[in-house]
Image (spheres, rainbow, N blue to C red):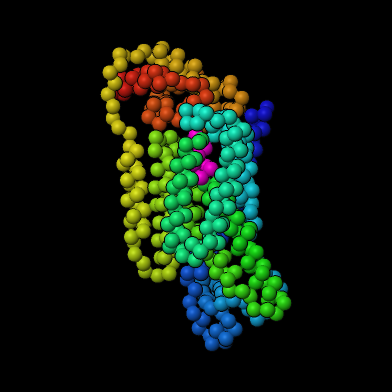
Amino acid sequence: MEAYVVEWLNILGRWVHFVTGIAWIGSSFYFIWLDNHLEAPKSADDDARGVGGELWSVHGGGFYHSQKYRVAPSSLPETLHWFKWEAYTTWISGMFLLALVYWYGAGVYLVDRTVADLSPAVAVGIAAAILAGGWLIYDLMCKSPLGRNDTGLSVVLFAMLGVLAWGLCQLFSGRGAYIHFGAVLGTIMVANVFFVIIPGQRRMVDAFERGDEPNPADGIRAKQRSVHNTYFTLPVLFVMTSNHYALTYGHEYNWLILVGITLAGALIRIYFVARHKGRTSLLPAIIAALIILAVAAAIAPKSRATTMNAVSFDALRSVIDSRCTTCHSASPTHAAFPAAPAGVMFDTDEQIRAEASRIHQQTVVLKVMPIGNLTEMSDQERALIDAWYLSNND
């Protein structure tokens, strides 16, 4: 019953995270787009009122007229909308999922003793420290003199993300490392909203209500953090779906693959942000495409020939029964799985033969199954699966 309840918490938490994530990313992308499409106000009266840019648009059968003030209007409207709860709820639901799946289930999804011999408690402690430390280091970098040089800051920040990706992949399972990389970025993004963007906006509103001139520095800092957030978005979205793609996190150089895809995602976003402003170079998008193609080519499975003697199906069946059906069965015996993961079951010979390619891919090519090698499948057993598959699929 415990595993069943956990599964339902997972379903509901993931649903909330998905919906709120759409709301946050959608509003973020929209305001980046809006900011980069503003035109100088056509009316001299608007310019005199402090309007710095405006945009006309049509959507859903209606016309909209958006205006952005250089600092603030002469008087605040009665209703002022704030955009914050989309970010907060996305992070809260994401942390709920992280704690439920990767911390509560650390022995299954976070710890891989072939990577590092950590206890679940130690692994969770390290993970939590990395989340907090990631934000603190990033924030100090932005507040340092380096923060006044956007190009220099971006280079150093990317180098540190490379170190982060490498370090996580030396500590945790590939799947756990990837999701924590995304969690660090996601924590930085929402902390930017909570500690920098929203407080800066509140100070601007408070200054206006006192009759003082708002400090433009608040807007400058908020803009810098907002730009960082938009460049982090595509890497975070990749990580959110990466658990479906073991060919990335299960690879020997999984950290380098993560760095490459992170760079590609940031370059794609750089291109689109620039494109919002008008005609721009395709170079960032081209480089991103080349990086993705290079990663795909580098991790492509190599054809192999086996020198082992022919392996009987009964020998294969014995390995599957002892190492795989603990989870992949109509009635799993592992406490963490109330049902077979992805609905894949190996109870009958027909089911095993039907999933032969997947079994070979996951246990031999990628070596990500059994997950965390919970059932301690040996190299000899993987070689046996390899030999059986190759001899029956020439």
Residue 259: give x, y in percent of width and height: 42, 47
**Observer-nearest residue: 227 or 127?**
127
> In the image, is 2 to the left or to the right of 381?
right
Q: Residue 309 occupies which quadrant of the picture?
A: top left
Which quadrant is the N terminus positioned in? top right
> In the image, is 239 to the left or to the right of 84?
left
**Observer-nearest residue: 177 or 148?**
148
Instruction: Tell me the residue at 42%/39% (across/down).
Output: 254
Q: Residue furthest front?
A: 145
Residue 256 versus residue 81 in the image, above or below = above
Residue 284: give x, y in percent of width and height: 36, 59
Instruction: Tell me the residue at 57%/35% (across/down).
Output: 123
The reply to whether the magenta stretch includes residue 103 is: no
Q: Residue 340 occupies which quadrant of the picture?
A: top right
Q: Residue 96 occupies which quadrant of the picture?
A: top right
Residue 99: give x, y in percent of width and height: 62, 39
**Observer-nearest residue: 234 or 71?**
71
Residue 106 versus residue 288 in the image, above or below = above
Instruction: Kindly tell me whether residue 107 is visible in this rendering.
Output: yes
Instruction: Tell me the residue at 64%/29% (across/down).
Output: 3
Total marks in image: 0
Q: Would you say the magenta stretch is mainly helix, strand or loop?
A: helix
Q: Which residues are magenta?
A: 173-181
Instruction: Tell me the residue at 41%/12% (across/down).
Output: 314
> In the image, is 12 to the left or to the right of 35?
right
Residue 15: give x, y in percent of width and height: 60, 44
